[in-house]
Image (cartoon, rainbow, N blue to C red):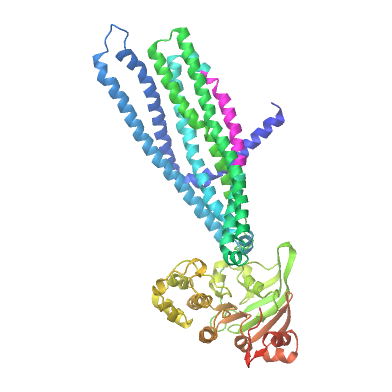
Amino acid sequence: MTKTALSTTSSAKTTTTRPLLRLARDFVRPYQGIVALIIALMAVEAALTGTLAYLLDPAVKSLFPPPPARPDPDMLLLIPGALFGVMALKASVSYVSGVSLARVGQGVINDVQVAMFAKVTRYDLAKLNAMHSGQFAARFLNDAMLIRESVTRSVQGMVRDILTIVGLSVVMFIQDWPLALMLCTVLPLTALYTLNLGRKSNKAAARSMASTGDLATHLSETLDGRRVVKAYRMEDHAIARAAHIVGERMKFLMKGAKARAAATPSAEVLAGAGIAAVITYAALRGMDLASFMSFMAAMMLSYQSIRSLSAFYTAVSEGSAAAERAYALLDAPSDVRDTTGDTLKLAAAPNRASIAFKNASFEYGAAIPALQDVSFEVPAGKTVALVGPSGAGKSTILNLILRFYDVTGGAIEIDGQDVRNVTVGSLRDAMALVTQEPFLFDETIADNIACGKPGATRAEIEAAAKAADAHTFVMGLAQGYETRVGEAGVRLSGGQRQRIAIARAILKNAPILLLDAATSSLDNESERAVQDALAELMKDRTTLVIAHRLSTIADADKIIVLAQGRVVEQGTHGELLARGGLYARLYRTQFAETRGAPAAVAE
């Protein structure tokens, strides 16, 4: 073999094992005590397996002597009893080691899944937006199972099977060392063949895992977009796409299955060749029956381990591919992270939580400018409204205040502190957000409101719901506050979901309030009640409002008018109308009166 070929083989082996070595260091190490016990038990099991094969020699000599000799009466009970005792002990050891190994494998997977979930949960918004939830679900569920199988097979293959083969080889060498030596030369050929199958399985596993992610993505999109799918009669298209993805996935799964399936027949062929060679050798040399039986038993038992070991590398290869994907997720850096341990320090109420944008600029991916040199202030305890056409940068401003993203130029300060120089946790603890499309978890109404204040009492939850005009409709439900809202709150109307979200913000009672079209889903009657609650909540709080209805915008202390990522006007409602600029044009267009009542501003 050439130096280049050797280098390539070595590199491929290193690439295959590196993720599993990291996995052992990071996730198996906490279970090292149990692993040590498993190794000891498997060593005992291997020794007992060798003992079984060896006992056949005295069993045949003592219990099956050539006629006319009679079986040794002392051995009639001793040897069968010893065989039974060894097998019973071996079964007990095997059970304990198997349960312990399952405990390690499942424990490792539990830890990997928790680590993956924690990592993704702490991703900044840019990375979350770049990763489809279906892809993550596939890694979280499918890849984790492959890792578990790899951990289990690694321990079994590297400990139990190898030790068993070694122990039985000792028995074979004791009975007839030339024959045992001849059989040992066949093992490297099987190993090379198995390694080649493992490389094929590794490649197929990586592709099948990618297809599994595509399938999970398509399923997630079809369910999330079910209204569009049905409205546009896209069922056939969705089914056809799913069939294509499933077909591709099956193709790669079958390649892996063929590689795995080929491993066992190779061991069977080896076993057949070995049996034929031993029988021929024994007959030609006149090998005594006792040694022959003991040798054959050791050989047959060792082939069981070889057969099991033949699937070892394929399982490890698939687990390595899964571990590599898991570490690609776990190792991904976050763009938004704490650079210091300093927490946000706010001035005493009511002069706290002022917000200042200082020549702030921001670009999304592909250098798409969203904000350019934006400067404005939100005085402590005051209400500022953001107005502008779609795409002007209003939502981006809220995202930057919350540090979902970091500015690419300039700075954002709260009470004079750059938000990048305080911990993300302390920053977000000071804010409550209500979005235009509220999201509810598939939990109870009480649980969804309590997100604003973990550990809140029922009285506090109900008080917040009353303030958000939600208490009445909640109590009208069969289970009241214990009603589960369904996926994303699908069992509630849009207005009901919004009032629950507002109750969540009221309960949080944060000094900074961020409202993104917070009442756009409410009917007029509910809006008036919620507006009263919000007006009370906004007292002495710094409030930033996006695309609110006319009453709130007109009452704001200041209105910031945005266009194409820039601030084009600032002032009060009256000042901006008198100026006759963009705000006045938006007002005439979006606030045109219908029957004497103003319509809602466009977002």
> Number of labelled discs?
0
- In the image, taking residue 202 as reference, residue 462 lies left or right, namely left
Q: Name which quarter of the figure residue 259 lies in.
A: top right
Magenta-tinted stretch: 183-205
Q: Is residue 190 visible?
A: yes
Residue plotted at (54% across, 34% down): 261
Q: Nearer the viewer, residue 245 or 185?
A: 245
546 lies above or below 551? above
Q: Name which quarter of the figure residue 596 lies in.
A: bottom right
Residue 448 falls within the magenta-colored stretch: no
Residue 234 percent across, percent down from the top left:
62, 62
Residue 278 percent across, percent down from the top left:
48, 15
586 lies above or below 8? below
| Magenta stretch: dominant secondary structure | helix
Residue 200 falls within the magenta-colored stretch: yes
573 lies above or below 127? below
Q: Nearer the viewer, residue 346 or 363?
A: 363
Quadrant where the N terminus sits is top right
Residue 17 percent across, percent down from the top left:
58, 39
